[in-house]
Image (cartoon, rainbow, N blue to C red):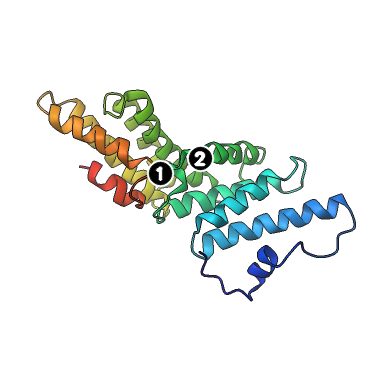
Amino acid sequence: MTTTPPDDPISAILDGGAGPVLAGPIETRLWRFVRTWTAVVRYEDHGGAPGDLEQALTGFESLPWDVPGLSRLAAVLMRAAVRTSATSAQPPLLDPRQRSRLRNLLRAAGSDPVPVPDWPQVLAAFEAVDTVVAMVAVAGAGPASSHDALVKVGRLMSVVGDAEPYAAVVGLMHDVLSHAEALRDDPAATAATAEFGRLLDRAHRPSGADGTLAERFGPLAG
């Protein structure tokens, strides 16, 4: 549930009906564009409710690819998903139901080299989480392939610098991979390695106990 008062302009646009009298298909799709952008604003600035993200993603997916400003809208929506993932108990970056949709946003935003000023940091945070999640799938929820992933995320740390919340997200993923690498190099850590794998597999799943990125991955950071 959002925390936005029901009589504010954002709710008036999103919840108040079909909108103004429209003259034709161009005006109709521009109104859908406005509603989608407004849903992004409500999602990021008024509580991060999953329903608002779903409304924004559905609205985006209803737009034709030749709508002016689509790449900017995709970037703003992707940035909201990344930034909210840093604090939400239901991080969309860990939800496989949303991850393919977020990749579509990346493709749409790619037509603009810098669609928003912090786009490099947005991409870096997404790629860092994606790298750890991919390690689960490829390595069977274990640290066996952590070295290449650690090198990659180390490079991403230089992209984000100290810009938050991106630095916290990338730094956490780097700590997780550093721990995995340490376990990989310790032949006596068989039990710890197995436990790391179980925790890693559980951390990235959307079902089960909710938790922020820090709550889910903190125990894996060593």
Q: Tag 1's secondary structure?
A: loop
Disc 2: which residue: 97
Task: Give the residue type that dot 2 points to.
Answer: Arg
Find the residue positioned furthest to the right.
Answer: 23
Q: Tag 2's secondary structure?
A: helix
Q: Are marks 2 and 1 in contact (CB under 8 Å)?
A: yes
Q: Nearer the viewer, residue 102 or 161?
A: 102
Instruction: Identify the residue at image location x=47%, y=53%.
Output: 83
CA gap, disc 2 to disc 1? 9 Å
Instruction: Identify the residue at image location x=55%, y=41%.
Output: 102
The label shown at residue 43 is: none
Query: Which quarter of the rendering shows the C terminus?
Result: top left
> Dot 1: few (<14), some (14–19), or many (≥20) neighbours within 10 Å?
some
Residue 27 locus on image (x, y percent)? 84, 55
Task: Give the residue type that dot 1 points to.
Answer: Pro
Can residue 118 be seen from the camera position used here?
no
The label shown at residue 206 is: 1
